[in-house]
């Protein structure tokens, strides 16, 4: 990354106008291995940003660096324009919730929630009032005297949230807080966490390896892989215009069909590609390319169609294919294809039935050019 091309103070300002949090060139190595490197992430005031990526990609390391549990080997971190590196965790004003809740088992719910206030030597009556108010906010009013062991998983997670929020943090960090809950509860808690975050307008970094959680909850998503940022964008950006093959395949499913670039094309322009069977189509390119390069033509299964016969040429990408198998999923049917141009593709048919096609049948695979993107190989 060109760290020198952006002056940190110039780019971010200080005080009220500054982004809530800025990471600039942040890296951490364990021996020769960089757990994270070249992280450039800015979170705006009130924003909900999700770090999304596979296990081991550096999400927890990033949170630990922000929280102050791990010192970075490179880069700067600014909270509302103030440098954080070197400051101990309890002086950062950051609330943290972990996957395993990390509640104190020997303390009551109220004592757990009030922990950060006692550590800050807030007077007892104020602690009691703020704890009660916070328990109401997370819908645990009246349960303050319970032991955490007497609560369900979802309730424990709410206690952990209340404990992080009661200190009025300037920033909230949530490390896979929902991954220990079963699916139904997880979906309920998604809404609950977003409701709280919006209500308190506390800027937040949420960590998950679950793409649907990230899509459902976030203002913006940071897709990470192997310690680096692959793409930052809104859920719609990430899903509809993935920057590369990793992002395309990690979020949702994506058909990737090999093709060759016919003539040089600029970034953001439309260029002609040719498939191995000789057929050609003009599609948008995210990054520029020279003629002769190999690319993957990316198109989502729900944006494609299958028809029995190849239609007349009208600009639609139509490739000869053979049905290999069908998967019935209730609300939709997946039609799996082998393409004459090489490779495989999947088409999701929402209205269709399994009876429309059968294995071995010769068909045409169709996609509108504007639903396709050329991604560099
Ligand atoms: N304390 C540590 N010592 C050595 N390696 C570590 C340590 N913490 C994390 N790592 C390594 O750093 C990488 C990122 O880990 P982590 O941030 O926990 O990933 P994630 O939270 O995305 O699953 C992994 O390769 C992990 O093994
Ligand atoms: Mg982790």
Image (cartoon, helix red, strand yellow):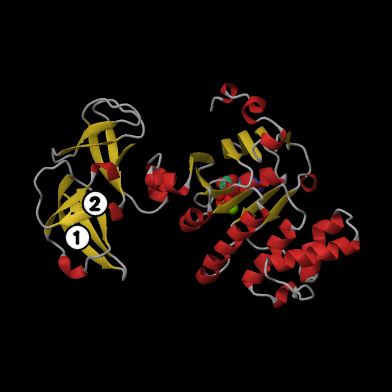
* Image: 61 above or below 124: above
The image shows residue 38 at horizontal and vertical percentages of 57, 33
- Would you identify the image quadrant in which residue 14 lies? top right
Q: Is residue 33 left or right of residue 368?
A: right
**Residue depicted at 43% across the width and 45% down the height:** 238
Disc 2 C-beta below 8 A from ligand 1: no
Question: Among all residues in the image, which is located at the extreme top?
Answer: 4
Q: Is residue 22 left or right of residue 284?
A: right
Q: Label 2 crowding class (10 Å Cα cut-off): few <14, some 14-19, many 20+?
A: some
Disc 1 C-beta below 8 A from ligand 1: no
**Residue depicted at 46% across the width and 57% down the height:** 212
Q: Is residue 38 left or right of residue 151?
A: left
The image shows residue 343 at horizontal and vertical percentages of 23, 48
**Residue depicted at 64% across the width and 43% down the height:** 45
SS label for mark 1: strand
Which quadrant holds the C terminus? Answer: top left
Q: Label 1 crowding class (10 Å Cα cut-off): few <14, some 14-19, many 20+?
A: some
The image shows residue 131 at horizontal and vertical percentages of 79, 64
Q: Is residue 358 visible to the viewer in this orientation of the structure?
A: no
Q: Nearer the viewer, residue 216 or 325?
A: 216
Q: Earlier in the sequence, mark 1 or mark 2?
A: 1
Q: Nearer the viewer, residue 90 or 314?
A: 314
The image shows residue 326 at horizontal and vertical percentages of 23, 65
Residue tagged by mark 1?
Answer: 324
**Are the two marked residues, 1 and 2, in contact with CB atoms closer than 8 angstroms?**
yes
Residue tagged by mark 2?
Answer: 344
Q: Is residue 355 left or right of residue 54?
A: left
Number of on-image labels? 2
Q: CA distance from mark 1 to mark 2?
A: 9 Å
SS label for mark 2: strand
Q: Is residue 53 visible to the viewer in this orientation of the structure?
A: yes
**Residue depicted at 43% across the width and 48% down the height:** 236
């Amino acid at each position: 990354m060109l760290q020198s091309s952006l002056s940190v103070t110039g780019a971010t300002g200080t005080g009220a106008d500054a982004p809530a949090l800025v990471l600039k060139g942040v890296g951490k190595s364990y021996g020769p291995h960089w757990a994270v490197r070249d992280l450039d992430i800015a979170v705006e005031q009130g924003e909900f940003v999700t770090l999304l990526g596979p296990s081991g990609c550096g999400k927890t390391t990033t949170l630990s660096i922000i929280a102050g549990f791990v010192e970075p080997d490179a880069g700067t971190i600014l909270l509302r324009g103030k440098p954080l590196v070197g400051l101990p965790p309890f002086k950062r004003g950051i609330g943290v919730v972990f996957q395993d809740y990390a509640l104190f088992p020997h303390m009551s719910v109220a004592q757990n929630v009030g922990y950060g206030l006692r550590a800050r030597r807030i007077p007892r009556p104020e602690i009691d009032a703020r704890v009660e108010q916070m328990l109401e906010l997370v819908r645990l009013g009246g349960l303050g005297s319970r032991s955490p062991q007497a609560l369900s998983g979802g309730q424990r997670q709410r206690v952990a949230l209340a404990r992080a929020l009661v200190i009025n943090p300037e920033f909230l960090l949530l490390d896979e807080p929902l991954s220990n809950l079963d699916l139904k509860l997880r979906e309920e808690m998604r809404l609950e966490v977003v409701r709280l975050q919006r209500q308190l307008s506390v800027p937040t970094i949420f960590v998950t390896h679950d793409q649907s959680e990230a899509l459902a909850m976030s203002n913006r998503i940071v897709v990470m892989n192997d310690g680096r940022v692959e793409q930052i964008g809104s859920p719609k950006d990430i899903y509809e215009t993935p920057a590369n093959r990793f992002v395309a395949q990690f979020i949702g499913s994506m058909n990737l069909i090999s093709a060759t670039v016919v003539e040089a094309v600029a970034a953001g322009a439309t260029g002609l590609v040719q498939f191995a069977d000789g057929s050609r189509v003009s599609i948008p390119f995210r990054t520029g390319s020279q003629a002769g390069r190999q690319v993957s033509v990316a198109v989502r299964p729900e944006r494609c169609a299958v028809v029995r016969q190849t239609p007349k040429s009208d600009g639609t990408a139509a490739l000869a294919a053979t049905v290999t198998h069908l998967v019935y999923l209730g609300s939709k049917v997946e039609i799996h294809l082998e393409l004459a141009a090489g490779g495989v593709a999947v088409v999701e048919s929402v209205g269709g039935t399994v009876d429309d096609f059968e294995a071995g049948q010769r068909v045409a695979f169709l996609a509108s050019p504007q639903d396709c993107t050329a991604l560099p190989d």
